[in-house]
Image (cartoon, rainbow, N blue to C red):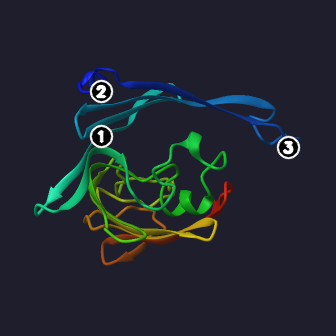
Amino acid sequence: TGNNHYLLLPDISFIGTQTGLFTRDKSQPDRNKFLFREGELAVQSFVYPGIKQDAFVVFANDEVTVEEAYLTAQQLKVLGKYPVSLTLGRRKAPFGRTNQLHPHSWQAVDNPAALRNLVDPESLTGDGAYVSYLFPTKFFLQLDAGYFGAANPTTSTDTVPEGGAAFADTFSTVRLWAGQHVGGGELELGGRFAVDRTPSEPAFTVARRTGRATERRGVDDRARKGSGAGGT
């Protein structure tokens, strides 16, 4: 348009999530009820050409929390020729295909048990930064690497296990993922790694430990044909 007026008008949206449980099981305290799970207010806008701001405020359980708030600088040049993007702030970490999705974007009402127990009940989130590099290949190939401080750290005084990676303080993540059109569909494959090397020792953890390091590794894939989709 030849001007930056769009920088003054952010995108604002609100999404409410409501669930219902209908069962004959009388042991369920919320049976045959509709429940308001959470409301999410999103404010998103470019604050400068090539720099975008995203903020997500969640209203749940009579509390208001800043779930995510971050800046993304696009197309930065490293060594003068390698374009990378930099994300800085509180962000769901780039760990697997679904970790950065919000609950209203999940394929099911709840996160799969494997993700709740081994990663986080909702998502692995931290305060920090990560860089993304899209390789100049004929097929899609991207590398994400980040360093975060745990948004909800676990300490050695915790007495109730809540599942998840049990990262005590700071943690690092790396994800490499690729995609390729095959026939009339698309195939995507990725691998990810996260590690927390802080000295504290949580009382409960289902993590694999090497010395005092908590590690998480995983592989994800997706196959999509035509307008349908499927994957793990």
Q: Amino acid at mark 2?
A: Thr
Image: 158 above or below 63: below
Residue at disc 3, secondary structure: loop
Q: If you read the primary sequence from the N terminus, does the residue marked by circle 2 or circle 3 appear first?
A: 2
Image: 34 above or below 70: above
* Residue 123 circle label: none
**Residue beneath label 1, please?**
70
Residue neighbourhood size for the residue with mark 2, other residues' Cα within 10 Å, grouped as few (<14), some (14–19), many (≥20)? few
Q: Quadrant of the N terminus?
A: top left
Distance between the Cα atoms at labels 1 and 2?
26 Å
Q: In front: 159, or 137?
A: 137
Q: Amino acid at mark 1?
A: Tyr
Q: Is residue 230 left or right of residue 137?
A: right
Q: Residue at x 30, y 40 (%)?
A: 70
Q: Is residue 93 left or right of residue 76?
A: right
Residue neighbourhood size for the residue with mark 3, other residues' Cα within 10 Å, grouped as few (<14), some (14–19), many (≥20)? few
Q: Residue at x 58, y 39 (%)?
A: 104
Q: If you read the primary sequence from the N terminus, does the residue marked by circle 1 or circle 3 appear first?
A: 3
Distance between the Cα atoms at labels 2 and 3?
59 Å
Q: Quadrant of residue 154?
A: bottom left
Q: Are marks 1 and 2 in contact (CB under 8 Å)?
A: no
Residue at disc 1, secondary structure: strand
**Residue beneath label 2, please?**
1
Task: Name the residue at the left extreme.
Answer: 79
Image: 141 above or below 49: below
Distance between the Cα atoms at labels 1 and 3?
43 Å
* Residue 25 circle label: 3
Q: Residue at x 51, y 49 (%)?
A: 122
